[in-house]
């Protein structure tokens, strides 16, 4: 099963090993230091330095930008989907769920935004995807507002202690059917 494993920083090594991941996306503050799990090679690790904020111009914090999302979409074009992808942020609640949605749509553009958001809510009751990332992803992936509307439709996630992880299965049936 091709999937995206979403987790907080504290669980990246455990989940990369458990799910046999070989690639990882980190959405973490610029000076946040951590060790990349040994099963993830440096050339298959995308680091996107950003804070979990929804507006630019918030002091010294780095807001998610178009450049961040462009790099994520480009990275996804290189993912062979032979093994799950780990996507993480500090707590696995906002930036990484948003990035997982964008990643899923980048590899399977035929995916229905509302079904994808519903699948996210089912596997991650705590997820509250970062609105700025979702808006940028919607625009760059030419979703015409569907991704934004789908994420608004699932609402804010449940309170969490920031230790929850989840696996977002990808719907590649439509993508493979359209390639046939």
Image (spheres, grey):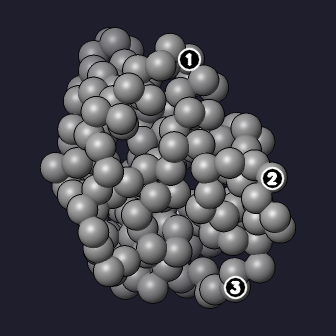
Q: Residues within 10 Å of mark 3 (few under 14, many from 20)?
A: few
Q: Which residue is mark 2?
A: 57
Q: Is residue 86 above or below residue 173?
A: below
Judging depth in this view, the residue of 102 and 174 nearest the camera is 102
Q: Are marks 1 and 3 in contact (CB under 8 Å)?
A: no
Judging depth in this view, the residue of 53 and 47 nearest the camera is 53
Is residue 172 at least partly visible in the picture? no
CA distance for labels 1 and 3: 34 Å
CA distance for labels 3 and 2: 23 Å
Q: Is residue 120 left or right of residue 141?
A: left
At x 32%, y 80%, the residue is: 161
3 vs 2, front mark:
2
Q: Which residue is mark 3?
A: 33
Residue 20 x, y percent position in the rendering: 36, 70
Q: Quadrant of residue 113?
A: top left
Q: Which residue is mark 1?
A: 142
Q: Earlier in the sequence, mark 2 or mark 1?
A: 2
Q: Is residue 141 left or right of residue 84?
A: right
At x 45%, y 74%, the residue is: 91
Q: Quadrant of residue 8?
A: bottom left
Q: Earlier in the sequence, mark 3 or mark 2?
A: 3
Q: Are marks 2 and 1 in contact (CB under 8 Å)?
A: no
Helix, strand or loop at mark 3: loop
Q: Are marks 3 and 2 in contact (CB under 8 Å)?
A: no
């Amino acid at each position: 099963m091709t999937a995206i494993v979403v987790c907080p920083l504290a669980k990246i090594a455990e989940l990369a090993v458990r799910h046999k991941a070989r690639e990882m996306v980190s959405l973490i503050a610029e000076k946040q230091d951590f060790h990349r799990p040994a099963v993830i090679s440096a050339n298959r690790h995308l680091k996107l330095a950003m804070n979990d904020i929804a507006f630019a111009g918030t002091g010294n914090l780095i807001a998610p930008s178009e450049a961040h999302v462009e790099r994520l979409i480009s990275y996804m074009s290189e993912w062979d989907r032979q093994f799950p992808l780990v996507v993480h942020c500090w707590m696995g609640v906002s930036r990484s769920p948003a990035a997982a949605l964008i990643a899923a749509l980048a590899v399977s553009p035929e995916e229905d935004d509302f079904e994808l958001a519903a699948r996210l809510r089912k596997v991650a009751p705590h997820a509250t995807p970062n609105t700025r990332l979702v808006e940028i992803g919607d625009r760059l992936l030419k979703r015409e507002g569907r991704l934004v509307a789908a994420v608004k439709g699932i609402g804010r996630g449940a309170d969490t202690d920031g230790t929850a992880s989840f696996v977002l299965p990808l719907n590649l049936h439509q993508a493979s059917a359209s390639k046939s």
